[in-house]
Image: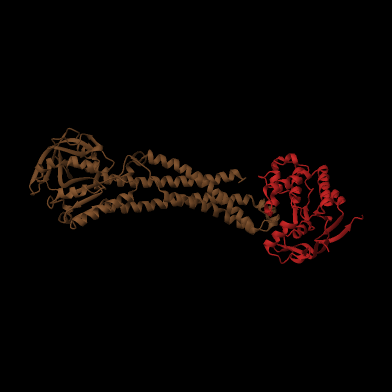
Chain colours: A red, B brown
């Protein structure tokens, strides 16, 4: 049984008199532990698909089924719980909270979960900060970090609560190639070690190279879905 | 609380609004209390006792209808624990003459020794109080004396009708000038002793008013309650006598004072609303600047209700901090006002007109107002977080993440 079933999902927006079809009848099945890239030209619907999978947006038609649970009929609070318990996001522009330190930013998902003591949150945060090799920067503010460091903090923040699914929107878009490769290797390692499902949208050929499955979107629909052998 | 600068400015706005409101309220209350205290100490005393016959014709200031049992009433009053002094007074109509010009006046006859147990005129005299031999001595209000061009040691001629309606005139030496905090007293006060008046007006010891002084109280309400208590006791003993408390004597002033306070309150409430707008604006800006942060929190699973509560709590905390600063600042300013006072004459000048308070006026503590303003400030700050927080919660998450 697939972890995520995306069945006949469409999403359109009204822009004045025009209707924009961001997604058209997308069907996709994603297993646990996949390292999947979604590629396509600008406007092909990559970010929209990620937002819908993460319930940041709702489809106009179709359904998302997560772990046999249809998400369409869930209440707003239930969707918030779904995001809290199963999903983590890595944003293209990092979206770190500027007044919180690195450690405090990483602790944020645990604070929202409300089931950890301060010490537990501290220890879990430091563990993932170690994993992304930023221990020395744990008390710094985001403005004191480079782009690559900020993205690593965003990865740490996403992984601190051990989510089943990580949704990353263009995670290497603002990084140089060396830093991008470092970030990808961290994601790969965590995918292997914790069986975390990574779904990321990207234009970066290097990311596409490392992905084990590539779904190509074109004009809101799936143009191809290729798995790497082995 | 990590948004320190924003929290600081919000708290500062709250504290400033509180400080302004409490200080103004203290000053207004102080002016009122000063005026009332002056009236009691200089003109109306705590109680005034008249015969019903005199009271019926009091506007004409007759020299008839005096008390028949002054000593008995005085002795009764002095036995009351609230009473600090009893003094007889009689008022008459006369005319002052200096170098031919006649000026109508209302004179007051007093027993100098007894009068100083009830009133505090002696503290405001330039020159001297009445001497032992006070047969031809007179004390005038300073402004009156200036107007007629007479100084201490100078002489004036006083014209009046005696008790038997004969016209009389006599010369009196000005021994002292009254320079009180009551502008009306300063511009129209004429005082002579019973020794002088018994001859000049053929009074024969007639006492029309028995004035009663009570021991002072910090709280005006307690003082007025004492006055009512003594009044009730006098009325029980002598039901026919007209007994008026200072509140009843100066009912007009108290009404005006109440109206003035209401207008003052309106002004202060407007000030407070302006401060509230400032608080709202600052917190609103705080939330709008953090719309994207709201999106991140929601993307990690924070519910809408939790987001709203978060901002409500932050607003509440900002209110607490601001109110604490406001209380500390108000404590300092009010302590200064209550102990050192403020120079009303220098601040208001001629604009005060005949309002019976002058010179240095002292502020008043008003705990009820402090509590009200504190709760208002905390409430406003908390509410200020609610509206924009609900707006942020209502926005689409994807829209908040794109918000700039």
Q: In this view, does A29 lie to the left or right of B196?
A: right
Residue B99, how many percent across, how many down?
14, 37
Q: Quadrant of residue B238?
A: bottom left
Q: Is residue B252 left or right of residue B129?
A: right
Residue at x-position 18% and y-position 41%: B191
Residue B92, how many percent across, how many down?
15, 47
**Residue B226 in sight:** yes
Q: Which of B227 and A222 is in front in this view?
A: B227
Quadrant (top left, top right, bottom left, bottom right) of the N terminus of chain A: bottom right
Residue at x-position 35% and y-position 54%: B259
Q: Nearer the viewer, residue A220 or A215?
A: A215
Residue at x-position 9% and y-position 48%: B163
Quadrant (top left, top right, bottom left, bottom right) of the C terminus of chain A: bottom right
Q: Nearer the viewer, residue B82 or A166?
A: B82
Q: How many marks?
A: 0
**Residue A91 in sight:** no
Taking the view exactly as shown, the residue that stands out farthest to the right is A229
Q: Nearer the viewer, residue A134 or B184?
A: A134
Q: Is residue B383 left or right of residue A109?
A: left
Residue A101, how many percent across, how many down?
68, 43
Residue A78, how many percent across, how many down?
69, 62
């Amino acid at each position: 049984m697939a972890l995520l079933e995306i069945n006949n999902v469409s999403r359109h927006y009204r822009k004045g008199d025009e209707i924009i079809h961001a997604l058209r009848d997308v069907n996709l099945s994603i297993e646990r532990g996949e390292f999947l890239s979604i590629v396509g030209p600008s406007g092909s619907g990559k970010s929209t698909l990620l937002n819908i999978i993460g319930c940041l947006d709702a489809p106009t038609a179709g359904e998302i089924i997560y772990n046999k649970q249809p998400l369409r009929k869930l209440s707003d609070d239930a969707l918030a719980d779904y995001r809290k318990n199963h999903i983590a996001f890595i944003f293209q522009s990092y979206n770190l909270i500027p007044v919180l330190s690195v450690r405090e930013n990483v602790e944020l998902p645990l604070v929202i979960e409300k089931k950890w003591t301060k010490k537990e949150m501290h220890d879990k945060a430091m563990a993932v900060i170690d994993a992304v090799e930023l221990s020395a920067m744990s008390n710094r503010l985001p403005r004191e970090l480079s782009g690559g460091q900020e993205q690593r903090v965003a990865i740490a923040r996403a992984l601190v609560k051990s989510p089943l699914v990580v949704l990353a929107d263009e995670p290497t878009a603002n990084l140089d190639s060396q830093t991008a490769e470092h970030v990808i290797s961290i994601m790969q390692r965590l995918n292997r070690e914790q069986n975390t499902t990574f779904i990321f949208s990207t234009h970066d050929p290097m990311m596409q190279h490392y992905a084990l499955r590539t779904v190509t979107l074109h004009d809101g629909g799936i143009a191809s879905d290729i798995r790497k052998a082995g | 609380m990590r948004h320190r600068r924003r929290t600081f400015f919000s708290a500062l706005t709250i504290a400033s609004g509180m400080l302004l409101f409490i200080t103004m309220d203290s000053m207004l209350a102080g002016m009122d209390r000063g005026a009332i205290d002056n009236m009691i100490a200089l003109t109306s005393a705590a109680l005034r006792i008249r015969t019903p016959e005199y009271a019926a014709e009091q506007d004409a200031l007759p020299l008839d209808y005096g008390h028949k049992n002054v000593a008995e009433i005085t002795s009764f009053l002095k036995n009351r624990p609230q009473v600090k002094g009893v003094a007889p007074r009689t008022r008459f109509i006369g005319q002052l003459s200096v170098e031919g010009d006649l000026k109508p006046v209302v004179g007051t006859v007093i027993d100098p020794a007894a009068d100083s147990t009830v009133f505090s005129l002696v503290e405001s005299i330039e020159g001297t109080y009445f001497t032992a031999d006070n047969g031809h001595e007179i004390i005038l209000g300073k402004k009156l004396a200036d107007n007629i061009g007479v100084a201490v040691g100078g002489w004036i001629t006083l014209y009046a009708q005696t008790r038997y309606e004969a016209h009389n005139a006599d010369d009196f030496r000005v021994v002292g000038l009254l320079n009180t905090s009551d502008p009306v007293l300063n511009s129209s006060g004429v005082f002579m002793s019973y020794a002088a008046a018994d001859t000049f007006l053929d009074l024969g010891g007639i006492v029309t008013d028995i004035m009663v002084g009570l021991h002072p109280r910090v709280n005006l309400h307690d003082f007025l309650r004492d006055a009512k208590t003594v009044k009730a006791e006098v009325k029980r003993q002598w039901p026919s006598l007209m007994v008026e408390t200072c509140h009843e004597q100066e009912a007009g002033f108290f009404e005006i004072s109440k109206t003035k306070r209401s207008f003052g309150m309106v002004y202060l409430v407007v000030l407070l609303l302006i401060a509230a707008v400032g608080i709202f604006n600052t917190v609103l800006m705080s939330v709008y600047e953090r719309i994207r942060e709201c999106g991140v929190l929601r993307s990690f699973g924070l519910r809408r209700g939790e987001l709203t509560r978060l901002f409500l709590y932050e607003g509440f905390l900002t209110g607490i901090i601001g109110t604490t600063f406001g209380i500390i600042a108000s404590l300092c300013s009010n302590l200064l006002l209550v102990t050192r006072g403020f120079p009303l004459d220098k601040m208001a000048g001629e604009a005060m007109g005949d309002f019976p308070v002058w010179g240095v006026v002292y502020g008043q503590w008003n705990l009820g107002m402090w509590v009200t303003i504190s709760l208002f400030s905390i409430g406003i700050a908390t509410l200020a977080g609610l509206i924009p927080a609900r707006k942020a919660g209502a926005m689409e998450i994807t829209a908040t993440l794109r918000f700039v």
